[in-house]
Image (tube, helix red, strand yellow):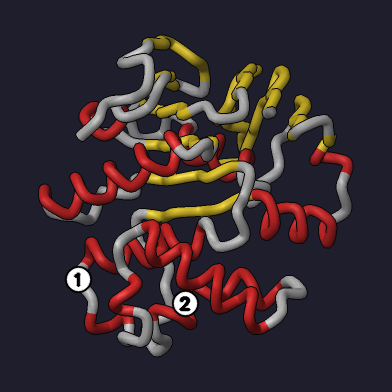
Amino acid sequence: MIELRNLSKVVQEAGRELPVLRSVDLSIQAGDFVSIMGPSGSGKSTLMNILGLLDEPTSGEYWFEGTNVRKLSGSKQAAFRNERIGFVFQAFMLIPRLSVKDNVEVPLLYTYCPRKERKRRIETALEQVGLLHKLNEPVVHLSGGQKQKVAIARSIINDPDLLLADEPSGNLDAESKEDILRIFTSLNRMGKTIVLVSHDREVAEIGKRILTLRNGEWTETSDPAPMGVAL
């Protein structure tokens, strides 16, 4: 599904070049669940941003189901990102003044989707995360765990091929964290391909594979469980 070949990222800092990713290779099959770990500054968030077409590598190739995404124009990359990639961030990235329904609907505003189909998709996504009963609630009234569930519902509203999660439980208490990890495990069992970044080993172990970055290079891989850890 995804193939990264010899991917590198160099940034300018204080007048000198600083390598962030060093010739990274990565293969991800459809239905996989990959957890990426690493210390602060290891390059894991940069790699996540490149996978999500939010950042450009300095060199190397990125193939997504046969498409060389680096050769797409800016507008085509934006459409590709909205239709085929879902994002879940540590800080939720919700619009406080909007309701749960309106936040989940945001990605649909950039596609042609009839009103009846929008309603069906929104309700289906919220049902999957157990939050349909909060459909019309303003997000400012929700707990942190509920906000992250809204963010997950928003991320799957377009039925993306790839779901990217960057520290999705980093701001949550223990109970909310378990709820969120159960949802990711369930989505993967339903066939969703997931890449999750976390510094928390317990969180990473819900994946089928754990990859560790250090100084922009892979240093360790492991297989925590054949189907991920069931919480």
Give how far across and how far down residue 224 sits, in percent. Answer: 31, 15
Does residue 14 appear in the picture of this structure?
no
Give how far across and how far down residue 200 sits, in percent. Answer: 24, 33
Q: Going by the image, does 184 lie left or right of 17?
A: left
Secondary structure of residue under mark 1: loop
Measured Cα–Cα span from mark 2 to mark 1: 15 Å
Residue type beneath disc 2: Asn
Does 74 sit above or below residue 111?
Answer: above
Q: Which mark is residue 103?
A: 2
Q: Which mark is residue 143?
A: 1
The front one of 199 and 180 is 180
* Number of numbered callouts drawn: 2
Q: Residue at x 64, y 72 (%)?
A: 108
Q: Residue at x 40, y 66 (%)?
A: 126
The front one of 163 and 183 is 183
Give how far across and how far down residue 83 sits, in percent. Answer: 70, 57
The image quadrant where one finds the C terminus is top left
Does residue 63 appear in the picture of this structure?
yes
Of the image marks 2 and 1, the number of the one nearer the N terminus:
2
Q: Residue furthest left?
A: 174
Give how far across and how far down residue 101 sits, in percent. Answer: 44, 80
Asked if the residue under mark 1 is in contact with the one under mark 2, i.e. CB atoms within 8 Å, the reply is: no
Does 137 sit above or below residue 162?
Answer: below
The image quadrant where one finds the N terminus is top right
Q: Going by the image, does 61 lie left or right of 11?
A: right
Q: Residue at x 70, y 36 (%)?
A: 57
Residue type beneath disc 1: Ser
Q: Mark 2: few, some, or many residues within 10 Å (few <14, many ≥20)?
A: many
Q: Mark 1: few, some, or many residues within 10 Å (few <14, many ≥20)?
A: few
Secondary structure of residue under mark 2: helix
Q: Quadrant of residue 112?
A: bottom right
